[in-house]
Each structure stands twice: as C-alpha cells, then as structure tokens.
Image (cartoon, helix red, strand yellow):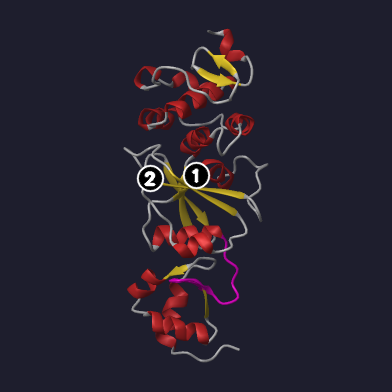
Amino acid sequence: MKKKAKPSKLNSLLSQWPKGTVAAQEWLYSLNIPRQLVEGYRRSGWVQRIGRGAYARSGEKIDWLGGVYALQKYLHLPVHVGAKTALELQGYAHFLPLGKGANVHLFGPPIQRLPIWFLRYNWESKVQFHASSLFLGKPDAGLTEKTIGEYSVRLSAPERAALEVASLVPQKETFEGAKLLLDGLATLRPELVQELLEACRSIKAKRLFLYLAEECEHPWVQKLDLDKVNLGSGKRSVIAGGHLNVKYQITVPEVSRVEKGV
C-alpha cells in the first residue's frame, strides 16, 4: 500500500515523467530530487528501482524503448535505434516481430558504452548494441524521431536503416533477410540515399546496398550519381563460396539480373 509522500516534488516528478519510460538519476538530480529522496519514494511504493541510477513507476511495465528514451533524453548518449528495428517501427518489414524475444538493434559510435542498468535489465527482447563507425564523419545523417505514446525516440530513417542492414550481413543479418527488407523500400528518397552513400565508410555495405536495390529494380536507383560515391577497389566477400558479381565485386548467392547488364 502506497504511503503518503510530500506532494510538491513527487507530483512534479510524476507529471513530467512520460509513462512507460525509465527515469535516470541524472534527470532526477535536475529536478532537485536527490538519491535519498528517490529511495524514500521507492520505500513508499511510488517508484521501483530497475538498476543503479534507474527507476520505473511502481507497477508499470517498461520495455526497451522506454530504456532507450532515458539513454537519449537524460544521459544524452549518441545512441539510436537502427537497421531492421528502425524499419519495423516506421511501418516497414511487417513480418518482423518486435515482441518478446525479438532482436533489437541499437547503434552508437565506436567508443560508446551503455550504462550497466540498461545492459543488465531483462527487456524481454534481445538487445544488440553495435558500436559502429558507419557514418562516423556525419553521425546525424539520416536520423529522425518517432513518437511512442507520450515520448519519442531517435532512430534511423529508412534510407539509413537499409545501409545499416547491409553492414550487418553476414555476421548479424542474412543475405536473404537483407534482400527481403530492401524489396519493401521502393520509395526511398534519392537525395538522402545519395548523401548517405557519400558519407558511409563501409565499402562492403555500399556495394551490397546498391546490388540489392538494383535486384529489386527500385526506380530511385536511377537518380543516384555513383561517380560521387567511393566504392573502393578489390573484391569483398559477402557470402562465403558465393558467386562473384562482377559489377560490384562482391560474392552473392546466385547469378541475378544485375549480371545481365555487366
């Protein structure tokens, strides 16, 4: 049973706390709520501790998105939702599950580390954090916001998410899965795709992305200026023992339509 607590700070906290999100101690400090007072709220039954320096409303179920909100909003970490997880959140890839046990992909710069409370909490999803240098020189390119209930999170726009998917093949994503995802992206914005291709640091990801886009016969591919895109030199192995696509110098499972134009 919840005990009575001083209304001023508690009411202020609850009114500013988006439902379904984690409250990080750093944010509580900004509200002049020290750790001792939060512990008092916990003992009174108003909040529950989910890890060191992280709290949820008592009796409220939180998911990984509520945790990501805290990373972005309160800890100001350069972490975003990416790859196929970002596509699903924006209405693409409807066949992908985001419920219990689903794979969730988060991206951040190479030196980024996530707080212990986020890593250890049971989100009921398999959260994978990719410390990536994919867009190191232009880290905010192709990022957008998505509203989830009372809050919003930063995530990759479909154009960036598609390149992130390509970068995960074959270690974290299958070739077939990447092709299926690209097949549903017929309306990508060529201007943003061009910007991202020029900024992307992975030769393999760019070649595979372009190969799959041509395989899917997306019209926006024809609007790209590949003379401005560094596609490197030499071969890149995507599928071990696969067929070499001459145009993009990557190994793929089988001969395809792209080969006909080579």
Q: Which mark is residue 110?
A: 2
Q: Going 38% across and 46% down the picture, which residue do you hit?
A: 109
Q: Is residue 219 above or below residue 106?
A: above
Q: Going 56% across and 24% down the picture, which residue do you hit?
A: 212
Q: CA distance from mark 2 to mark 1?
A: 15 Å
Taking the image as drawn, is residue 181 in sight?
A: yes
Q: Kindly state the secondary structure of the residue where label 1 is placed.
A: loop
Q: Is residue 204 above or below residue 108?
A: above
Q: Quadrant of residue 215?
A: top right
Q: Which mark is residue 90?
A: none
* Mark 2, other Cα within 10 Å: few <14 / some 14–19 / many ≥20: few
Residue situated in front as seen by the camera: 10 or 115? 115
Residue situated in front as seen by the camera: 222 or 251? 251
- Name of the residue lying farthest toward the bottom: 4
- Three-letter code for the amino acid on which mark 2 is drawn: Pro
- Three-letter code for the amino acid on which mark 1 is drawn: Gly
* Mark 1, other Cα within 10 Å: few <14 / some 14–19 / many ≥20: many
Q: Kindly state the secondary structure of the residue where label 2 is placed.
A: loop
- Name of the residue lying farthest toward the left: 137
Residue position marked by numbered label 1 in the rendering: 82
117 left or right, relative to 232: right
* Position of residue 11 measured from the top left corner of the image (x, y, whole percent): 45, 81
Residue situated in front as seen by the camera: 208 or 112? 112
* Position of residue 4 measured from the top left corner of the image (x, y, whole percent): 51, 92
Q: Given this view, does label 2 or label 1 mark the residue nearer the observer? A: 2
Q: Quadrant of residue 63?
A: bottom right
| First to last magenta residue range | 50-63
